[in-house]
Image: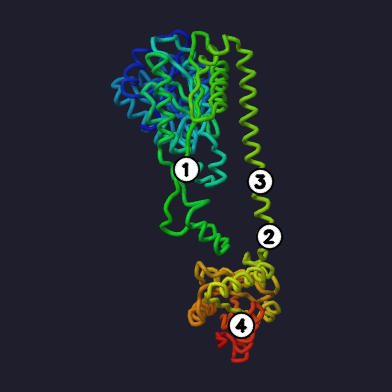
Amino acid sequence: MDATTIAWVLPHEGYDDEAAIAPLRAQGLRVLTCVAGQALPDEAELRVMQAGLFADARRLRREYVLDARPTLIVAASAEQEADALEFLKPRDDVVRGLRPAELLVLRLARLLKNAGGEARLHSLQFTDELTGLPNRKRWQAQLAQELGQPPGVECRAVVLFDLDHFKQINDRFGHQAGDQVLREAAALLLAQMAPGDRLARWGGEEFAALVSRYDRATVEADVQRMLQRLADHPFHAPAAAGSGYERLVNRFDDTAPAPLDGEPLQRMAVSASAGLAFLGERSTFADVMSQADVALYEAKGRGRNRLVSYESLQESSGGDDRDLYVRHFENVTRVLTERMTTLVTHMGRSLVEAARREANQDALTQLHNRRYFDARLSREVETAHKHGRALALALVDLDHFHDVNAEFGYPTGDQVLRRFAEIARHGVRLTDWLARYGGEEFCLVMPDTDLDTAARVAERVRAQVAATDIRGVDQRRVALTVSVGVAALASPQDSPLSLVQRASEAVLAAKRAGRNRLVVAR
């Protein structure tokens, strides 16, 4: 069964019910005892109450209504069973006796299954949804419980792991890649834990672990191996900055962010820093977490991707904790300064990029605007002349667009322009680029393309527009066609102006011939 944590309700402090609990623990369940009238442990997913331990049915019912978790009542007689059935909710259950334990386990499994979403919802309150690990709240309860246990022969330590430069991973590769890193890091750390260890997501890119080993040297060696395992693991993300795809996109200044099919994954450099604090007889939750945090920031201050223990810091400072916390303040300040510098740099770069896009992009269609078209076409013509390459241009004019605005309204006219831009984007090649020339006129520029090939590309766009079912704001069908004129560089004397002029004359010829057709300027 999925839920293994059971709250076992006892009548009073000191009541010994171990004989009843032991068989359930032997079946793999985690049983936590609690006293009637007190709050149940947060991590408990099911509750077991024995009717025979309460003075009467009224007191049993009063305890029952104190908590909403799925509950199994154990009755010792038919009378107790009948009393319980009078107030039990439909999702809860009653069973006669504690034996055999296997039957009790099956009843608990059935109870959890019937509770369904409610039990899972309660469980999610203590589980990190991204990694599946216990969350901060559950970790606090687990560590507090561990600190309340008498010290054993093993050496116990709390470890805080922090993924280095995690914000840069998010900024460079995206939050989806960052989430994948967190999931993989959690799985790697969990795989390195011994059966008695605990691991939780402390928050953000930090994980907390409780590690028990024979001695301190073994604890430190095992944690160091965990860090090495993270550093050696091949974390991958979709192709991003510096990839072949981006270089190709930058060459043509395309704005489409999606990678090409089959693009190889790019490896991400991921490492972690760790701070370790050993548990002592008088350790408190606040003390041990603070000590691990001091050690963690010392590890980051020393260059990251390393382990530092609080005890080693104490030894180096001569036992003066004041010096340690001064160093901690300096390390925290240094790390925060690095993060702020990275954040400001990234924000500045993003603002500049946004301003550049806004200056060169048509707000309505999201295509390049006239300003961008004029500047880039001049560069394309210059490059074609210099290297002896072909260059073609198609001028596209939406037929009777004034009538669309007049009959359907301007909002539908805007919608038609956006729809045309979408159709055109999907109909051209990766190396081609589109711009809104003005009003209902658009330009398709095709580098390294001869006149015949350009005509075939432009004709494909024209046919797709004519075949598309376009609807207005009021869902009426808008019959849309386009007239297209195609021209190509013909001589070394051709300029951007002469190229556009020939394409424009071809468009006018297409309109005179009846519209919804393509004319090539020879």
Q: Quadrant of the N terminus?
A: top left
Asked if residue 212 shows in the view, the reply is yes
Instruction: Estimate the spatial distance between the alpha carbons at disc 1 and disc 4, rounded to whole Å.
Output: 48 Å
Instruction: Estimate the spatial distance between the alpha carbons at disc 1 and disc 2, rounded to whole Å.
Output: 31 Å
Of labels 1 and 2, the one closer to you: 1
Residue at horizontal 52 percent and vertical 25 percent from the top: 67
The reply to whether dot 2 and dot 4 touch (C-beta < 8 Å) is: no
Q: Which residue is mark 2?
A: 358
Instruction: Estimate the spatial distance between the alpha carbons at disc 2 and disc 3, rounded to whole Å.
Output: 16 Å
As rendered, which of 485 and 123 lies closer to the eye?
485
Instruction: Give the label on residue 503, or none.
Output: 4
N-terminal of the two: label 1 or label 2? Answer: 1
- Callout 3: helix, strand or loop? helix
Relative to 332, residue 505 above or below: below
Q: Residues within 10 Å of mark 3 (few under 14, many from 20)?
A: few
Residue at horizontal 54 percent and vertical 73 percent from the top: 446
N-terminal of the two: label 1 or label 4? Answer: 1
Instruction: Estimate the spatial distance between the alpha carbons at disc 1 and disc 3, rounded to whole Å.
Output: 22 Å
Q: Residues within 10 Å of mark 2 (few under 14, many from 20)?
A: some
Q: Which residue is mark 3?
A: 347
N-terminal of the two: label 2 or label 3? Answer: 3
Q: Position of residue 408 (x, y in %)?
A: 67, 76
N-terminal of the two: label 2 or label 4? Answer: 2
Q: Which residue is mark 1?
A: 268
Q: Position of residue 412 (x, y in %)?
A: 66, 72
Q: Please, what is the three-letter code of the amino acid marked with disc 4?
A: Ala
Relative to 6, residue 455 above or below: below
Q: Please, what is the three-letter code of the amino acid marked with disc 2?
A: Glu
Residue at horizontal 65 percent and vertical 70 percent from the top: 373
